[in-house]
Image (tube, coloured by chain):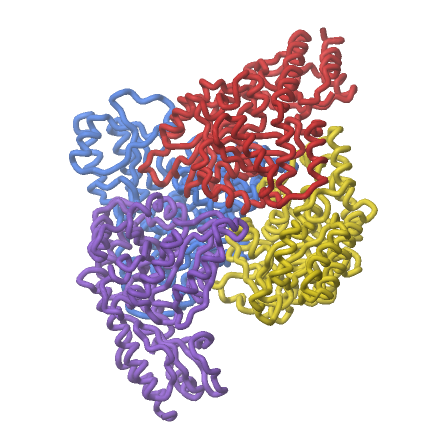
Chain colours: A red, B yellow, C blue, D purple
Amino acid sequence: MIFASDNWMGASDRVAAALVEAAAGHAPAYGNDPLTAAVEASFSRVFEREVATFFVATGTAANALSLAQFAKPGGVVFCHRDAHIAVDECGAPEFFGGGSRLHRIDGAGGKLLPADLAAAISAYPAEALHHGQPAAVSISQLTEAGTAYTPAEIAEIAAVAHGAGLPLHMDGARFGNAVAGLGVSPAEASWRSGVDVLSFGGSKNGCFAAEAVVFFDPGKARGFEFHRKRAGQLFSKSRFVSAQFAAYLDGDHWLDMAAHANAMAQRLADGLVAAGSAVPLRPLGNEIFATLSKAADGRLRAAGASYYEWPPAGLIAAPLDNDTIFVRLVTSFRTDEADVERFVQIVSAVDA
Amino acid sequence: MIFASDNWMGASDRVAAALVEAAAGHAPAYGNDPLTAAVEASFSRVFEREVATFFVATGTAANALSLAQFAKPGGVVFCHRDAHIAVDECGAPEFFGGGSRLHRIDGAGGKLLPADLAAAISAYPAEALHHGQPAAVSISQLTEAGTAYTPAEIAEIAAVAHGAGLPLHMDGARFGNAVAGLGVSPAEASWRSGVDVLSFGGSKNGCFAAEAVVFFDPGKARGFEFHRKRAGQLFSKSRFVSAQFAAYLDGDHWLDMAAHANAMAQRLADGLVAAGSAVPLRPLGNEIFATLSKAADGRLRAAGASYYEWPPAGLIAAPLDNDTIFVRLVTSFRTDEADVERFVQIVSAVDA
Amino acid sequence: MIFASDNWMGASDRVAAALVEAAAGHAPAYGNDPLTAAVEASFSRVFEREVATFFVATGTAANALSLAQFAKPGGVVFCHRDAHIAVDECGAPEFFGGGSRLHRIDGAGGKLLPADLAAAISAYPAEALHHGQPAAVSISQLTEAGTAYTPAEIAEIAAVAHGAGLPLHMDGARFGNAVAGLGVSPAEASWRSGVDVLSFGGSKNGCFAAEAVVFFDPGKARGFEFHRKRAGQLFSKSRFVSAQFAAYLDGDHWLDMAAHANAMAQRLADGLVAAGSAVPLRPLGNEIFATLSKAADGRLRAAGASYYEWPPAGLIAAPLDNDTIFVRLVTSFRTDEADVERFVQIVSAVDA
Amino acid sequence: MIFASDNWMGASDRVAAALVEAAAGHAPAYGNDPLTAAVEASFSRVFEREVATFFVATGTAANALSLAQFAKPGGVVFCHRDAHIAVDECGAPEFFGGGSRLHRIDGAGGKLLPADLAAAISAYPAEALHHGQPAAVSISQLTEAGTAYTPAEIAEIAAVAHGAGLPLHMDGARFGNAVAGLGVSPAEASWRSGVDVLSFGGSKNGCFAAEAVVFFDPGKARGFEFHRKRAGQLFSKSRFVSAQFAAYLDGDHWLDMAAHANAMAQRLADGLVAAGSAVPLRPLGNEIFATLSKAADGRLRAAGASYYEWPPAGLIAAPLDNDTIFVRLVTSFRTDEADVERFVQIVSAVDA
C-alpha cells in the first residue's frame, strides 16, 4: 500500500526493457545518436508540431533551466504560492536565473487566477526599475493540490502573460496524469492553450530518470543547449534517456500508465468518501488529499501503508478536530487495485 | 571497431541487470532508501575510510559542484591547460562557482608539475586583492593525455596545494582505468596521496549514468547536499544510480572492466608501434594517441572504424608530415580483442 | 517645500568642504591612504569597539554585499514584507547571494515580530533539503514605515536569529535618524543589541555618496574585501568617501543633522495632526505617513511642494474616503523650519 | 614626484567646484534630475550621435556591466593577456556575466592582433557546445602597456568581432589620454571605428569618482538599467556624478587635462632616454615603462618619488641585468612640470 509518492515506484517493464536493449549496443555520445534523433521526432509527433526537446536529469533542472532561458537582471517569475519551484527546489530557479525572484500568488485549489496574476504583474510597472522586471509566468499541471487547469483556464493565464510580454512555462512533472485526466490532447493541454515551454516529466510515471524541456517554438530555444551543458545536465550516454522516452511514448504507453494511476486515485477517493473521509478536491489525476481519523491512520500504518501527512492549509476550509489528520495519497502506474481496496477497507472497517 | 570514446559504449550486463532488478520494486525517493545507504557504505569500504558520497548526473556536474563547495568571491581554480573542466564543460565550473576563474597551466604529457603550480599560485599573493584569490587545485586522473599521476606525483601536488591552504580536487572520469593501470589501491590513488575530493566516474566504464562526488573528509562536505539539490542534480529515484554503482563496485567489477580496457589499449599500442605508428605516450589506461598514415586512415574508415582525429599540440614534438594524421583511440570495458587485432592488421597491411 | 525624499537633498557644507580639501592633494589609491585608515578608526570609536568597515557606493550595495558574506546554496534571508531589500533593490540581494531567496514576513508598523520570525525560520527545518536553508535575518532601522526598533526589540530578534545560527543584518540607510530619535548610543542601537553587520548610510543624511558596511566582529568580515572588489564597489579614489565620512562623523555632525531632520518631522506631524490629518505612526525619525485631503494636496502642489503619494496598506487600518489621499513626507538635515510651517499652514488654511 | 598612478591624484578644481555647487541644491533622486539629463545629452554631443549613457561607481563596474549586457551561458570574452578585466578586477567580469570565461590572447605592446583574435574565436566553433560560445571582444584604450590602438587598428579588430557576431567593448579607463594622444575625435576613437560599448573613465583624469558606460547604439542598451541597479551601481544622488561629468566635458576640460598628462609623459620619456634609460614603447598617453639603474632608483626613493616596479615581461625583449629595474611611471592632469624635470635630473645626475 504505497501511496507516499509516485516517485517511490520503480520503472515500467517496457521502459526497463528498452533500457536494457540499448545497453547492449553503442552509439555516439552527447545525444548525437539515431535513437535520440528519433525520440526528439516523437515529441514533435506527440505534440502535433515541430518542437525543440532537450533531455535533462531531473524535474528541478527542467524547471530551472526552462526559466533560465528567459531570465533577466532583476527578473521576477510569477507562480502559485505552493508551486514546486517556489517550495521544493532549494532555490534552483533563483540560482539558474542569476538571482531571479519568485513572486508567489495565492490561489484556491492550487491554481493561479488570471486576475490575481495580472495584479501581481502590475506591481512591476516598466518605469519602476527598483522593483525589478517581470520575466516569466509558471504554472504546474497537475497543480500541487492535485488539480488540473482546463485548456480554457490555461488560455486565460496565457493571455495575461503574453499581454505583458511574458512567456508561459508549465511544470509538467505530472503532465501525463493531467492529459489523461482531462481527456484532451497533449497539444491542447500545452501550446494550443498558450504554453511556451513545458517541463515534461517521465520519472514519476514509469521511467527511471527521464525529464525533458519542450519548447513549442524552436526559435525560443536558441542557445538553450548551452544552458543545459553548462548546468551539467547533458548526459554523455544521452541515448539511455532516449531509450526510456522511446518506450514511454510508444503506443501511448505514458498515457495508459497515467490513466491507470488516475483511475486508482478515483477509486481511492470514492472509497474514502464512502468511508467518511473528507476529500476536498475531487481528483482528476493521481493525487488525493483527504482527512483520516487518527484511529484509521494507526490501523493503516500498522498494516504497512505509506503516505505523508500534509498541511491542510489552503486545501480545506474548516479546521481539523483533534482526532483527525490530513494526508496526501499518490497513486502510480503500478498501484495495485487490491491495495486500494485494502486501504479503503482498513479505513472503513471500524470507523464506518 | 569503436575507438571513438568509452562513452559510446552501452552498459555492462551486470549493471543493466541490477537496474532492471531495482526497477521492479519501490523505495523512498531522493536517496532515502536502503540501497543508497548500502552503496554509500560501499564507497567507504572501497576507499578504506569513512567518506561522504553524493551521486550526480554527469561528470561535468561532479567536477563543477566539487569545486563550488570551495568557491570564494574572485576565486581562482588552478588546473592543466587541457583540463576537461577548462576545455569541455562549457563554463560549468565558472558558473557553479559564482564566476570562478580557471587558471590554466602548461605541462607535458597532460600533467601539472608542482613547481609550475606553485608559481601560478604565487601570482595571487594575499595582499593583491585585485587579482583574485586562490580557491582550489584540480587535476585529472587519467589525464587528458591518457597518462596517470603516480601516487608520489599526486602527493607532491597536494603538498603545494595544501601548503597554500587549497583543497585538491581530482577529476576521476577515468579513475577506474587509472587505479587498474597503476596497480595501487583506490585509497592510494586518492586521499592517501592528498586528494580532498574526487569526481568518481562510472559512466565511461560500464554504467548508464553514474557519477559520484566523494569527499574524503566528510566534514568538508558540510552543506554540499544543498549545492547538489540546487543544481537539479538530486535524482528523485536516486536508487537507480545506487543500483548501478552497487553492481559496479561489487566484486571489483569496475576494476575488472577497467583492466580489460587498459589491456586492450596496450595491445593496440603495441600493434600500432609495430605497424610503424608513433605512440608518443605509453598508455597506462585506455586512451592512446598515435600517428596514422592517411592511407591507413582511409582503409580504417572504409572498414567502419570510428575514432577522432586529435590536435597533436603538446603530445608530440615533431610536426607531422603531410601524409600523416594524429588520432585518439579509446578502448572500453567492452572492446573486443578481435577488433583490436583487425584494426592493427588494417594499419599494417599495406603500410608495413 | 521638499518632502519627497531625503536623498533629494544635496550635501552638508562641512561634508562638501572636506571633499574639496581632499581634492587638492594626492594619496595612494584603493583605500591604502592615511585618511581612510583614520576614518576606519573613527568607526571603531563611534561604535566603542573594534569594527571592520568597508566603504561602498550605494545602500543597495551595502545591503546586498553584507548578506552575500553569509550566503549559502539555497540560502534564505528573512525580512519584513516591505523591506527595502525585498522591494526596492531590483534583486541585488538575490543576485549577490548567488540566487538567495528573500522570505518576507508580515508585521505591523514596518517591524518584524520575534515570534513571526521564529515561525518563518521553522519552515526550513535542517532535514528539509528541498526548501532551502536559512542564511540570515535582515531588519531595517528606521523601518520602511518610519518607525524604529528599540534596543530591546532588536535584542529579541537577535535572540531568535542567533538561536537558529543566523547572523542579524541591519539596513541602516537611516541609522543616524534612528540613533538620534531613540536617544541611545550607536553601539546600543547595533551590536550591543545583537546586530552582526550594519549597512551604515550617509548619503541620505548629508553626504554625496557615502555608505559603509560595518562588521562588529572583524572575524566575520574575512574575505569581504573580495566581495567588494568583485562587485565593482572598491573606489580607486576611496579617500573621497573617507573625506565625506570624516566630516560626517566629526563632532557628531551626523547625529546633529539627523536630530534636525527628526525635529522637523515631529513639528510637521504635530502640525498635520492639528490640521486634521491622520498620522498613524508617531514619527521617531524623519519619515511621516499622513492623510491629506485632496483639496490640501491641490493647494500644496500648486505651491510647489514635493512629496509622494503612498500605498496606505499596512500603515492605516481604515480605508480612505474618496476625498483623502495618503502620503509620505520625508525631512532632511537641510529641511527649513519655515518650509514646515508653510506646509502646515497650507494644509490647515481652508480645511481647518 | 607622484608617478605611482593617475588615480593617486585628487580632482580638478573645476570638477570640485561643480560638485560643491550641486551640493547646495536639491533635485530628484536616481538620475531623474535635469542635470543628469543635460549631461547625458552632452555625451551625445561629444560622440556626435545619440548614445545611451549610464553612470556607475568604478571602472571595474563599467567593464563588468558592459560585458554582462552581452553575456551568454558558457560565454567567452576575448581580450588581451594583460587586460585589466583579466588581471585586476577580481573576477568581476566573470561574476556579472554569470560565470563568463575570459579568453586571454598574447599580443606585443599590449595590443590584440586581428589575426590572433580570429584564431582564438575559431577555437569555439558553433557546433562545439562543450567549449562554450563566444560572447564579446574587449580591448583597452590606452592599453595596459600605455599604447593606443589607432582607429584603423580598432576597425580591423571590430571587423573580426562583428564578423563573428560579437560586440566590441572598449575599456576606456584612460580614453581621454588616448583621444588626446591620437589627435582624433572621440567618435573616431570609438564607434566610427566599430566600438559598440565604451567604459568611459573620468576618475583617473580629474574626477572624484565618475565612470560611465556608453552604448553607441541605444537599442543595444535595452534593459541595461536593470543590470546597473541590480549591481548596486545606481547612485541615489546621481547628479553628483553628473556634476563631475558636466565640468569634465565642458569646454573639453577632459581633453585638456589628458593632453597635459600626455605632454608630461613625453617630456619624462625624453628625459629618461637622454639619461640612458630604455623606454621600449614610445608613450602616446600618460604611461611610461622604463628601465632605471638601481642607483637611480635609490636616489629617487630617497627624494620621495613614488612609482611602481613593474614586470618587464612582454614589454622589453632583453633580460635586465642585475643593476637595473623596470618601472611604470604615470603622469596625470596635475603632474607638475618641475617634478618631471627634477625626476629626470635625479636619474641623470650621476648615472649619466
Residue at the (46%, 27%) spot, across then down: A195
Question: Which residue, as the protein is rendered here, is positioned at the far front?
Answer: B350
Q: Is residue B65 left or right of residue C186?
A: right
As drawn, is D305 to the left or to the right of D207? right
Image x and y of residue C10, in percent: 26, 51
* Residue C8 drawn above or below residue D17: above
Q: Is residue C191 above or below residue B322?
A: above
Q: Nearer the viewer, residue A336 or C167?
A: A336
Percent x, y for residue A99? Answer: 47, 42
Total labels drawn = 0
**Residue C185 appears in the rendering:** no
Residue A1 figure quarter: top right
Q: Is residue A177 visible?
A: yes
Location of residue A122 (image quadrant):
top left
* C273 on left or right of A298: left
Position of residue A120 relative to residue C84, above or below, is above
- From this view, report whether residue D89 is shown above or below residue A313: below
Front-most of A57 and B301? B301
Q: Residue furthest toward the right?
A: B251
Task: Estimate the x, y position of residue B168 in percent, counting from the top left.
Answer: 65, 59
Q: Is residue A205 left or right of residue B266?
A: left
What residue is drawn where x is 61% and y is 27%?
A: A249
If the image is split into quadrants, where does the C terminus of chain A sit?
top right
Residue A261: image quadrant is top right
Q: Nearer the viewer, residue B286 or D4?
A: B286
Residue A260, given in percent of the width and then of the height, sits at: 65, 18
